[in-house]
Image: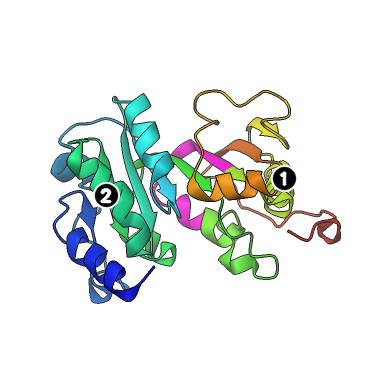
Amino acid sequence: MSGKDKLRKFNENATFTSLYQPALDAIFENDYELKGKWNAKVFKNDNPIVLELGCGKGEYTIALSQKFPNKNFIGIDIKGARLWKGAKFAHENNLENVAFVRTRIDFITSFFAENEISEIWITFADPQLKRNRKRLTGIMFLNRYKKFLRNDGIIHLKTDSRFLYEYTLALAKQNNLKIIEANNDIYGSSIADDILSIKTFYELQFLEQGFEITYLAFCLNSATTLKEPVWEKEKYNR
């Protein structure tokens, strides 16, 4: 993508009412102005709110919003050029149950209040093979989610990384978290329904390379003190 094309998208992003791009000083060690107010101020209803973390171009956020009009969806990513596609689609199609936020997920607790979120989708995140603290299903991030996710709220992980899938599955088992579904090849096992068969830009690339796509769904209990899992991580290199 050329610099000129990026600039065009950044300028257009500023016109989308469903895309929120807070300045760093508005969220760094501060609560964002919409924290606790997403239903009242943005969606204007009391429907459950679902997050997609690292949403990229917003394919999952958009598709889920169309399949579940009785829920609200917020896609979060740091890359404005990626968010442009989903935000543009939501704008042009008047999708009232969709919003996007451009920010680093490190600041996620600045955006949402206690019990404000009902579910989280994590789709094709960087597995962070050597950096536990950066892993979106690692203990540090799970403890952050507990601050705003409803008790026993669902976390969905869809990934091409067997490392991330096996690590997260081991963590859920280690901490006696309720596992709703665990599948290490959703297309090979025919588990991929109309929700799991939603394909992102990155998923299509992984499928072309022959990688199996995994899916894990579990409930995060807010009262659980999380411990790192004991597992054979050396078996997985991606």
Q: Residue at x 33, y 55 (%)?
A: 83
| Residue identifier under label 1 | 210
User: Residue type at mark 2?
Assistant: Ala
Coordinates of residue 52 in the picture (x, y in percent):
42, 46
Q: Is residue 113 visible?
A: no
* Residue placed most toward the observer, 90 or 215: 90
Q: Secondary structure at mark 2?
A: helix
Q: Which residues are magenta?
A: 143-157
Mark 2 packing: few (<14 Cα in 10 Å), some, or many (20+)? Answer: many
Which residue type carries mark 1?
A: Gly
Residue 154 shows in this picture? yes
Horizontal relation, residue 187 to residue 232: left or right: left
The question of residue 152 being in magenta is answered with yes
Q: Which residue is mark 2?
A: 87
Please name which of the two marks, 1 or 2, marks the residue nearer to the observer.
1
Q: What secondary structure do most residues of the magenta stretch adopt?
A: strand
Q: Residue at x 32, y 47 (%)?
A: 86
Q: How is the image coloured?
A: rainbow
Write down the quadrant of residue 149 in the picture.
Answer: top left
